[in-house]
Image: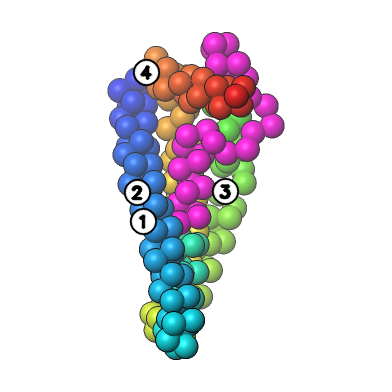
Amino acid sequence: MIRLSEALYALSAALNFLALRLAAFCFFGMLLTMMLQVVARYAFASPPFWTEELARWLMVWGGLLGASCAFHAHADPAMVTPPAKVIWRQKVQVVARLVASWAFFVPVLWYSFPFVLRQLGRTSEGLEISTAWMASALPVTILLILLHGLAGLGALVSPRVLAREIAFADQYETNHSE
């Protein structure tokens, strides 16, 4: 059970690493796209028609992937943040995060698949590709958040996972005490 929880936590960390890099790439791409649009508009009086839509798509993907990264790093808003050194409170918080995230996101995930399916028949005007590519950001992000919550549950059985969760709590306390 300990090895399984550590493997799941490692998978969560690896996917978070990829999501963080992809979110940064999306925001950088959005910045470049908007700069191109501004330069083309004011220097050449002819902005490309696709730049605004591409920037919007990159913003959606970057923001949602960033939200999953924030959940993984415990940087999401929390009502209560237990002291990092109180182990039983950390374990209660892990369970509470899991229950709350699953209670909120499972119904959203359930309805996001029909939403993506409805988008399959639509094509964007500027990029001329299926809008399902943008709509699929929602279920991808929700699946990542649910996986991060499930992986955090490993803190109940694995000392390594618990140590990592405590490190996130220490970092949170340090950031908020400054």
Mark-to-mark CA distance, 4 and 2: 25 Å
> Which residues make up the magenta segment?
62-90
Does the magenta portion include 85? yes
- Secondary structure of residue under mark 1: helix
Does the magenta portion include 158? no
Q: Quadrant of the N terminus?
A: top left
Point 47% across, 75% down: residue = 38
Tag 2: amino acid:
Arg
Question: Residue 160, labelled with which disc?
Answer: 4
The reply, left or right, for residue 53 in relation to residue 176 is: left
Tally of marks: 4
Closest to the camera, between mark 3 and mark 1, is 1
Mark sitting earlier along the chain (3/2): 2
- Residue linked to disc 2: 21
Mark sitting earlier along the chain (3/1): 1
- Secondary structure of residue under mark 4: helix
Taking 91 as reference, is 101 above or below it? below
- Residue contact between numbered discs 3 and 1, judged by CB atoms under 8 Å: no
Mark sitting earlier along the chain (4/2): 2
Closest to the camera, between mark 4 and mark 2, is 2
Q: Residues within 10 Å of mark 3 (few under 14, many from 20)?
A: some
Point 53% across, 69% down: residue = 115
Closest to the camera, between mark 4 and mark 3, is 4
Mark-to-mark CA distance, 2 and 1: 6 Å
- Residue linked to disc 3: 105
